[in-house]
Image: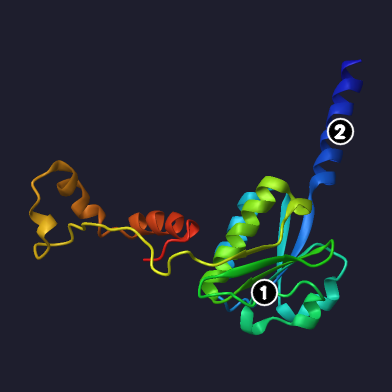
Amino acid sequence: MKTRHALFSVLFALGSAGASAQTVHVLADPELPLVGPVLAELRTATDDTTYVLEPLDSLGDVRNEPTIVLSLLGDVDREAMGSGCAPSPDLKPEGFSLRRCGPSTLWVVGSDPAGLLYGGFELAEQLAISGWGGVQDTDQNPYMAMRGTKFNLPLDVRTPTYSDPGESAQVNMPVMWELDFWKEYIDPVSYTHLTL
């Protein structure tokens, strides 16, 4: 009885693991530097999905399979998008349109590389919350063109904060020169759409 129960458990686990796995074709210009962070965010949001990066011109080869197209506004093939899927004509710098074009294709169109990054992050968030079927058409433009944070950096003797005798300033001086600190800081800042 225990052997049969254990065998059933293993078969159920294998069957459910295979059923939930999905392959999604991501069509993009691999030369765009922000495609990598978008892919990383998609993988984080949907850990049961494999994303395969392919060139933009291979859209015709994957018509009926789950596909995400990452494109800049100037590179959009409106005929390939189909009727009713056009990106917003009002996209501003750092803006994006997210479109569902049929049951198996999602388009992220950025007005520029930053807009493509933000659109990819929005898609990843929608996939994490609602899954493939719950992705909604979205148009977003920044409310403020310049947005960011202010730092009083204790970089060296020429800056007023360097002579701050407080413990936090003294402890932070060496950290300001560490590349790992800035990577840890800038990644979440870009995710929240702040500019520096």
Horizontal and vertical percent position of residue 56: 72, 78
Q: Is residue 38 left or right of residue 54?
A: left
**Picture residue at 58% right of the left edge, 74% below the top:** 91
Q: Tag 2 or tag 1, which sits nearer the N-term?
A: 2
* Residue bearing the label numbered 1: 28
Q: Position of residue 65 (x, y in %)?
A: 84, 64
73 in relation to 137, above or below: below
Q: Quadrant of the N terminus?
A: top right
Find residue 80 and name its label. none
- Residue at left 75%, top 51%? 134
Q: Image quadrant of residue 160?
A: bottom left
User: Could you tell me residue 71's position as x and y percent?
Assistant: 65, 75
Nearer to us in this view, 91 or 130: 91
Q: Is residue 184 above or below residue 100?
A: above
Type of amino acid at the residue the image marks with label 2 = Phe
Residue 151 placement: quadrant: bottom left
Crowd band around label 2 with a 10 angstrom C-alpha radius: few (<14), some (14–19), many (20+): few
Name the residue carrying label 2.
12
Closest to the camera, between mark 1 and mark 2, is: 1
Residue pictured at 42% horizontal, 57% vertical = 189
In the rendered structure, the answer to whether residue 137 lies left or right of residue 110 reads: right
Q: Amino acid at mark 1?
A: Ala
User: Which element is circle 2 on?
Assistant: helix
The C terminus sits in image quarter: bottom left
Give the alpha-carbon distance from disc 1 to disc 2, as whole Å.
Answer: 37 Å
Relative to the observer, which residue lies in front, 68 or 36?
68
